[in-house]
Amino acid sequence: MSHTATTPTQQKQAPPTHPTKKQPSQTTTRVVAAIGGILIVALVIFILIGGPQPDAKPVSLGFSFNSFFRWIGEMGPIVQIPLVLVIFAAVVGILLLLIEYAPRHGRGYFWLRLVTSFAIPLLAFMMLRPYQNAVVYVVIIALIAGGLLFYMDYRAREGAGYLYQLTLFLAPAFIMLLVGLIYPAISTVIQSFYDKTGENFVGMDNYVWAFTNPQGFWSIINTLIWAVFVPIFATVVGLAYAAFMERARGERLLKVLVFMPFAIAPVSISLIWKFVYDYRQGDQIGLLNAIVVAFGGEPVRWLDTWPLVNTFCLLIAFVWAQTGFAMVILSAAIKAVPVEQMEAAQLDGTTSWQRFINVTVPGIRTSIVVVLTTVTIAALKLYDIVAVMTGGRSNSTVLGFEMVNQQQRFQSYGHAAALAVLIFVFVAPLIVYNVIQLRKQREVR
């Protein structure tokens, strides 16, 4: 008769295994989110294109943002400030309570997340007081947004409540971004396809006008000239200042003097340079014409001389202001170039100019790109200098000025919207490129 020997290890029973919870499919979640996002965008565009009916009464919950601001406006300043602070504190307090309690586990917290996911978007959209012909679409948008929030939060890998909490944190900033940037941008693009009254659809006529009408055409040409020459001149002069001031006595004082024009308001800069270019019969008070007359020449109408003379006169004033910005950024970059590289190049028998070209400039390449793109963006959206010094006369207009001019002077909202879209088309690639360069710089560090 045989006996089977058992060891203590064999006598221990293996712990029971529990099936692990299957992670939700992220692909399905992304597909549902994409479909919901497309539906929301389509409904918003449909509302913007459709517009409100003149005879339709607004539908709201009995109060709206419009009525709230009117109610606040009827009060005195002494009452307005504490009342706004109390309402702001109440809204923040509600958000903090939801952020604290809603992400917890349990049936009650589940229903809290479910109800608030639908209630908050619906309340927010209805407080915009939609018109009768848009209220159905507004309710649908709110329900889709709430459903997407709850669905994506419920299927999040981090657990239910994580995405909900994150959304509440980001909601105030996102709402401000939506109301202050995204909605106006979409509305401007749509407006650019309508006539000056904003009622009749004209297709691409406004863009054709921008490239064929003298005002629109020269605003585009001059803007491109500014975008090409201003960053080059400002960067080259700023780099020269930064390089020469590294070994100069009183470096800090010199940098303050060079940077000072950048701190001056653009209107003040325009007035200063307007006196420089001033033209009149008899005694000259304009510095440039005073010099011309002193050498026996005749005074020149610098700001009215066309082609392109007046544009470059305005351009010089802007370069004078932007040089200080370029100098400060490039000076800091030059100081960050490793000393060992400069010493090694000096031991190789290179001259100062060779060290500057072959060591310093490659070492600050990223900063040069940032300065170039930043100054270019500032030149593309220029308004003040042209408005104060010439008012756009003699074909000196630019896109930023002409956009405001078409809207305020001629009440042509379609033309103004088309010019605004063109500015965005010119600026957007530079912003994206600037962000990419900054990210590369961070990765190197």
Image (cartoon, rainbow, N blue to C red):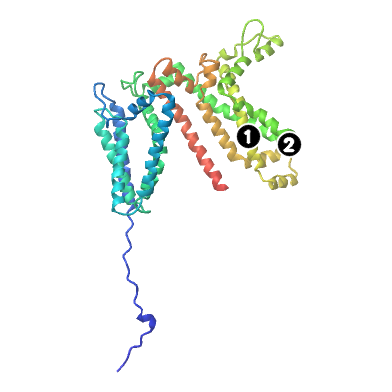
Measured along the vertical axis of the image, is residue 443 above or below residue 46?
A: below
The answer to whether 334 appears left or right of 105 in the picture is right
Tell me the amino acid under the disc marked 1.
Val
Q: Quadrant of residue 190?
A: top left
The answer to whether 340 appears left or right of 202 in the picture is right
Callout 2: helix, strand or loop?
Answer: loop
Tell me the amino acid under the disc marked 2.
Arg
Q: Position of residue 58 (x, y in %)?
A: 26, 26
* Marks 1 & 2, CB-CB < 8 Å contact: no
Image quarter where the N terminus lies is bottom left
The answer to whether 48 appears left or right of 338 in the picture is left
Circle 1 Cα neighbour tier, 10 Å, few/some/many (<14 / 14–19 / ≥20): some
Query: Which residue lies at the image location 41% right of the left edge and 27% below the top edge?
Result: 79
Query: Which residue lies at the image location 65% right of the left edge and 12% below the top edge?
Result: 289
The answer to whether 243 appears left or right of 302 in the picture is right
Measured along the vertical axis of the image, is residue 345 above or below residue 388?
A: below
Q: CA distance from mark 1 to mark 2?
A: 15 Å
| Residue that label 2 marks | 247
Measured along the vertical axis of the image, is residue 151 above or below residue 126?
A: below
Residue in front for this viewpoint, 316 or 20:
20
| Residue that label 1 marks | 328
Q: Position of residue 116 (x, y in %)?
A: 31, 43
Q: Position of residue 429 (x, y in %)?
A: 47, 34
Name the mark on residue 95. none
Q: Is residue 334 visible?
A: yes
Circle 2 Cα neighbour tier, 10 Å, few/some/many (<14 / 14–19 / ≥20): few
Residue in front for this viewpoint, 36 or 125:
125
Q: Is residue 233 visible?
A: no
Q: Position of residue 374 (x, y in %)?
A: 54, 33
Query: Which residue lies at the image location 52% right of the left edge and 43% below the top edge?
Result: 439
Q: Who comes first in sequence, dot 1 or dot 2?
A: 2
Callout 1: helix, strand or loop?
Answer: helix
